[in-house]
Image (cartoon, grey):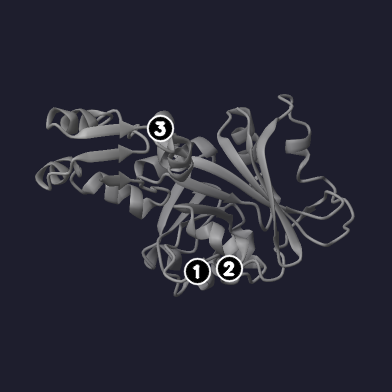
Amino acid sequence: MAKLLVKASTLKQANLMLRTPPCTEALIKAKVKKVVVGMVDPNPIVAFKGVERLRDAGIEVIVGVEEELCKSLNEPYIHRMLTGKPFLTLRYSLSVNGNFLDLLGNGVTDCGGYHSRLLQEYDAVVISSSLFSENLSVPASQEPGANQPIRIIIHKDPGSSKQIQLAINGVTGKVIIFTDNKTVTAPEVAQQGIEIVVLDQINLDVILDYCNCQGLCSVLLDIRGSFGEFEELVKEGIKKNYINKFVTEILPVWDGLAEPDPLQTLKSSEQGLKVVNLKSMASDQSVVIEGYFKL
């Protein structure tokens, strides 16, 4: 008996599924008697055709075993197939009294830390160029053998051009810079082979459509650095129901309220955002809460 349970939450895995021939003929050739299928591929090009081919060949096929678990494992791939846009997760940090923090907790970027593990789960991570003005490095997963996400840099701050060049030196993996026609990107960056996308106005629709065309199934919107570079993206994501999931790190810090409040976009949402499937975990001294926006 063959039991099929495939996880396609990363770009490499999703592309592998699209590039490799279907296993249907291999199963028939191997004279398998029974196949247990967790879920049917939502891709309309192939959906259920493999099951029908197996049954026509006289193989017993059971469909829907542990279906919800399979859907959870393949969540980004399914979302992209059904909507034409990547699965989008919003990550940000808070103090214990609920104020926005431009910080990550101790140890969370190390191997085994939640942020390190989070990065390896996503095909791309959207970050602010202001990170490099603070001499922070390009985020990377420290997990053994991790697939590093494509780094998408939102560049609206002309003063960070030279810092970008320094930060991306030696970075493994693809880097893409989204900038507007008002911001000058250092020519040395382009000479490094970095892809630069110049827009009249940076918006989430363009970024997600670009990612979809690249075959990316999942994108992490990592709110670090200047929130000003993310504000319009977050507003658009909420208004158009593009943000599917959130990950919130609560640090052991009591912090005064920043003016203006960077999270006012979330707090003042007219839709009255509802969340479901809340989970919490400890990561060193921080508490991490994740959940889904009920769209």
- In this rendering, would 44 be left or right of 81? left
Quadrant of image for the C terminus? top right
The disc labelled 1 sits on which kind of residue?
A: Glu
Residue 159 percent coordinates (x, y): 62, 62
Mark 3, residue position: 84
As rendered, which of 80 and 40 lies closer to the eye? Answer: 40
| Element marked by disc 1 | loop
Q: Is residue 185 left or right of residue 261?
A: left
The image's mark for residue 143 is: 1
Q: Secondary structure at mark 2?
A: loop
Q: Quadrant of the N terminus?
A: top left
The answer to whether any part of residue 53 appears in the image is yes
Residue type highlighted by circle 3? Gly
Circle nearer the N terminus (1, 3):
3
How many residues crowd around disc 3 within 10 Å: few (fewer than 14), some, or many (20 or more)? some
Q: Using the image as rendered, state which of residue 30 and residue 295 is in the foreground.
A: 30
Residue 228 horizontal/vertical position (percent): 69, 48
Residue occupying the point 65% across, 52% down: 223
Which amino acid type corresponds to the residue marked 2 in the rendered image? Gly
The answer, for residue 180, to whether it is visible in the render is: no
Q: Which mark is residue 112?
A: 2
Q: Which class describes the residues within 10 Å of circle 2: few (<14), some (14-19), or many (20+)?
A: some
Residue at (26% x, 40% y) in the render: 35
In this view, 249 is above or below 140: above
> For the residues marked 1 and 3, what is the alpha-carbon distance in whole angstroms?
30 Å
| Residue at image coords 28%, 29% | 47
Q: Give the numbered dot on residue 164.
A: none
Q: Earlier in the sequence, mark 2 or mark 3?
A: 3
For the residues bearing labels 1 and 2, Cβ distance under 8 angstroms = yes
Element at badge 3? loop
Which residue is more in the foreground, 116 or 223? 116
Residue 201 place in picture, x, y as percent: 54, 39
